Image (cartoon, rainbow, N blue to C red):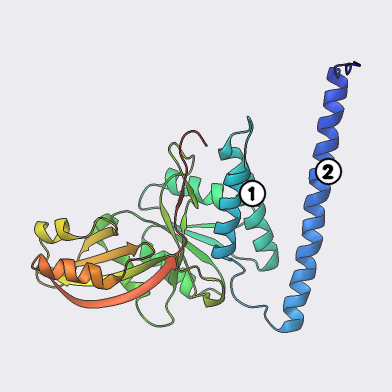
Amino acid sequence: MQTQTPLSLADLRAEIDRIDEAMHRLLMERSAIIDRLVQVKRTAGAESGSAFRPAREADMMRRLVERHHGLLPLDTVESIWRVIIATFTYVQAPYSVHADLAVGEPAMRDSARFHFGFTVPFVPHMGARGVIDAVKSSKGDLGLIAAVAPGAGDPWWTALEAEGAPKIIARLPFVERADHPAGLPVFVVSHPIDDAAVREVRVYSLRVTGWSAAAGRGIPAFAEVVVAPDEALDGAALLASLPPGHGVDEVITALTEAGAGVRAVAEVGSHAAIHRVGAET
């Protein structure tokens, strides 16, 4: 039985060079397809607004995780793909990323750079409402706001309630795991993009009266809720993210049974369900 001669270091390095060149050529091929896509959009009169497609991107990242194996860390693979996706999106329709630094500049900047790279302009703000205003006045910019309790108790999501106002279109990271290098949970805010929206998790703004510890404990466990004081007497503003199979009526019923009252409800966006992976992945 004939045995194969082990490859030398020079042979292995030549293989690496061959693969590197192939990857570069594939990226250029992808670029050429994007250029044709832009031309088709112009011909069809569809060249407007953001080219960000959260449903497609979430699906791409899920498939990436499912097929990945080997010694290359998932963090590296995810980061490379995020930069490729975000940069080619920028090539189609230039946009900026506005980010609220109130939660802390390092964590928010890490999230922005991990998910959108360095080609997309990064615009810092101190406060979520400044981010929303910037997105609203832009053609297709994105806003990043931490999905945690707001600083100074500002229920910024009430600015998303009006018809035509910016909405939540994604939650990052798409792939959630322990020790994620950009693990800060972040909502992506954009002009509504109904043709590309993903409706797996629906996000609601609720204005609640008679808020209390009992009302907080009464919120169903399936709901991810951010709470801030509201102007109403003993009131609170809630940002509730509801997974597939659950509706806002369930939350309203639970709050009512706990002695609170719901005086206003508005859907303020939606996003893909978080794809969680364990340490073994």
Q: Residue at x 61, y 48 (%)?
A: 64
Q: Residue at x 20, y 60 (%)?
A: 219
Asked if the residue under mark 2 is in contact with the one under mark 1, i.e. CB atoms within 8 Å, the reply is no
Q: Position of residue 193 (x, y in %)?
A: 53, 74
User: Tag 2: residue type?
Assistant: Ala
Secondary structure at badge 1 equals: helix
Tell me if I can see residue 14 in this picture: yes
Q: Position of residue 67 (x, y in %)?
A: 63, 44
Q: Residue at x 45, y 41 (%)?
A: 177
**Of residues 112 and 75, the one drawn nearer to the viewer in this rendering:** 75
**Relative height, residue 62 to residue 38 (above, below):** above
Q: Residue at x 86, y 36 (%)?
A: 18
- How many callouts does the rendering have? 2
Q: Position of residue 252 (x, y in %)?
A: 20, 71
In the visual, does 207 lie left or right of 83? Answer: left
Q: Which residue is mark 2?
A: 22
Q: Residues within 10 Å of mark 2 (few under 14, many from 20)?
A: few
In the visual, does 179 lie left or right of 121? Answer: left
Secondary structure at badge 2 equals: helix
Quarter containing the N terminus? top right
User: Tag 1: residue type?
Assistant: Trp
Q: Which residue is mark 1?
A: 81
In the visual, does 227 lie left or right of 117? Answer: left
Tell me if I can see residue 121 in this picture: no
Q: Position of residue 209 (x, y in %)?
A: 13, 71
Q: Give the alpha-carbon distance from disc 1 to disc 2, as whole Å.
A: 16 Å
